[in-house]
Image (cartoon, helix red, strand yellow):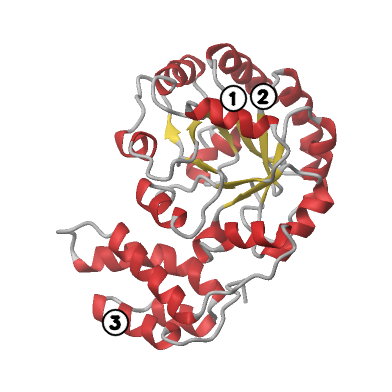
Amino acid sequence: MTPSETFSALLRGNALLTALAPMQDVTTLQFMRVVDRYGGPEIYWTEYFRVHGDSRPEKWILDSITKNPTGKPVVAQMIGNDIPALVRNAKLLQKFPVAAIDLNLGCPAPIVYRKCAGGGLLREPQKIDAILGALRDAVSIPFTVKTRIGFESPEEFDLLLPIFAKHAIDLLTVHARTVKQMYRPGVRYDLIAHAARELKCPVLANGNVFSAAQAQQLLAETGARGLMIGRGAIRNPWLFEQIRVQMRGENIKLPVGRDVLNYVHELWDNEITPGVRESAQVQRMKKFTNFIGEGIGEKFLHDIRRVATTADFWRVCEEYLNHGEPMALAPK
């Protein structure tokens, strides 16, 4: 089957769906390769293709599709507000082995939403209506949307759901925070449940999924078909497999410190570009250890954020992770 046929079959089925969230400068080909070795999700999302004017799909993002090492479907996500450009890029992307085309309506970065893209579009429901209509006509494979629950207020979500229903999207991922909320506490899982009840398409729950037990509870509370996980999967690449084990009613085997240390080594080996100056390499790895450290503790975060050399980076990692004690890797 083609990736889009595989994805369609997953949507039609009843099995739990798990997905790696699209994260800029994180969900690259290299990170997909690492996560998949730890069990990985059923579906991968690309970081977003920036669509504007005469833009074309970025090659480094296309690599995560054309060189996909996982054997799992990869969804191509776009961000932008120029309807002709979005249609043109959607048609270009469908020439590659993509599972679906996804529209980003959730990016909370001010540099993005100030341009009325990503989460900024949530302030303009009529514009969303026009974009979804044009893309639904242009996309012959599954068409999906990733959204937040509103820009300023959760009350905005009731205006969005009828628009998603109108255009018969194939899947909706709901990050249950507002754009202005960014990643602060107060995730509205009840609104994911509302979407799951109201829409005919499957709904994925997104936002602060941090453990297998919590994931199981979240699925029961919301009635969602599955989960999209971002930062939790950086912190704990075992999480997707742990969730599957939890749902089967089996005992979860936690990684020990040395397993986590080996994971950091794998990230280093896959993420570091030869010839790049040492300080840049260390800074690149801090992007990951900032998330991993949430499951280790404040002292680790304090120390790792202050390293500047490769030797110091590994000294700190060895100090905190070279042990045989089980690690839950949930936020502390």
Residue, disc 3: 312
Looking at the picture, does residue 169 appear above or below residue 180? above
**Labelled pair 3, 1 in contact (Cβ < 8 Å):** no
Pinpoint residue 195: horizontal percent, then vertical percent: 79, 37
Q: Given the image, on which type of amino acid does mark 3 rest?
A: Asp
Position of the C terminus by quadrant: bottom right
Front: mark 3 or 1: 1
Q: Residue at x 72, y 38 (%)?
A: 203
Q: Given the image, on which type of amino acid does mark 2 rest?
A: Ile
Element type at marker 3? Answer: helix
Q: Name the one closer to the observer, 99 or 318.
A: 99
Real-space CA distance between mark 2 and mark 3, rounded to the nearest whole angstrom:
49 Å
Residue, disc 2: 169
Residues packed near mark 3 inside 10 Å, few (<14), some (14 to 19) or many (20 plus) = some
**Labelled pair 1, 2 in contact (Cβ < 8 Å):** yes
Real-space CA distance between mark 3 and mark 1, rounded to the nearest whole angstrom:
46 Å
Q: Given the image, on which type of amino acid does mark 1 rest?
A: Phe
Residues packed near mark 2 inside 10 Å, few (<14), some (14 to 19) or many (20 plus) = many
Q: Name the one closer to the observer, 205 or 282.
A: 205
Answer left or right for 298 relative to 278: right
Residue, disc 1: 143
Q: Residue at x 14, y 59 (%)?
A: 275
Quarter of the view holding residue 303: bottom left
Pinpoint residue 296: horizontal percent, then vertical percent: 53, 78
Looking at the picture, does residue 248 appear above or below residue 55? below
Can residue 210 be seen here? The reply is yes
Answer left or right for 182 relative to 51: right
Residues packed near mark 1 inside 10 Å, few (<14), some (14 to 19) or many (20 plus) = many
